[in-house]
Image: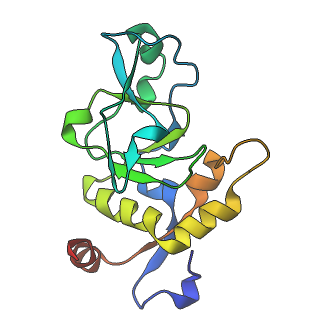
Amino acid sequence: MQSEATLPTGWTQVPLESLAVEGSVTYGVVQPGQAVADGVPMVRVNNFRGFGLDTSDVLRISADVEAKYARTRLRADDVLVTVVGTVGQVAVVPHWLAGWNVARAVAVIRPRDARLTRWIALALRAPESQRALGVAANTTVQTTINLKDLRKLPVPLPEPNEREAIELL
């Protein structure tokens, strides 16, 4: 990301985890098991399209498996970012996806304030963040972003009024 010296006047730079509920920058279901027709739907990397999610092809997992991953049970306005495979894709959880879960390849970021949701998504999509994620990626077997690196990712942060004006653009 940008160094603090190149940030606009009045902006700061903070680690991503400081904008999230403590412990919420984490990944989802590691071993989903067999698909279950009436199970809990799960967002995977293949569901990311542009800046949103395509849920026409969804894996459903058993409620017992999903219950072990309650920490990543989705809420409206969570921010999702792919951390395995095609890394760095970002989407915001719409209200109708609340209660779903995510695969291991998707990180959930729960903003500490819902007013930060759009900013976090914009910051993660920014070229500087995408470059930083690319540099941090481990590509030994499959491209993977370590959660520690994601949590420490520097996010530029303007004053609230300026942030809200930028989000409207």
Q: In this view, does 153 lie above or below 52?
A: below
User: Farthest residue toward the right?
Assistant: 140
Q: In this view, does 75 lie above or below 65?
A: below
Q: Quadrant of the N terminus?
A: bottom right
Return the x and y of residue 142 as percentages of the image width and height: 70, 43
Please tell me which residue is depicted at 64% across the width and 62% down the height of the picture.
134
Say which quarter of the image contains residue 57.
Answer: top left
Please tell me which residue is depicted at 61% across the width and 61% down the height of the picture.
133
- Confirm whether residue 24 shows in the render: no
Say which quarter of the image contains residue 56.
Answer: top left
- Left or right of 18, for residue 75: left
Return the x and y of residue 45 as percentages of the image width and height: 48, 40
Of 136 and 51, the residue lying toward us? 51
Q: Quadrant of the C terminus?
A: bottom left
Of 142 and 23, the residue lying toward us? 142
Color style of the picture = rainbow
Return the x and y of residue 151 as percentages of the image width and height: 56, 53
- Left or right of 132, for residue 122: left
Give the total of numbered labels: 0
- Confirm whether residue 154 shows in the render: yes
Please tell me which residue is depicted at 41% across the width and 91% down the height of the picture.
9
- Left or right of 13, for residue 133: right
Return the x and y of residue 98 as percentages of the image width and height: 26, 32
Please tell me which residue is depicted at 20% across the width and 35% down the height of the picture.
96
Q: Is residue 133 above or below residue 131?
A: above
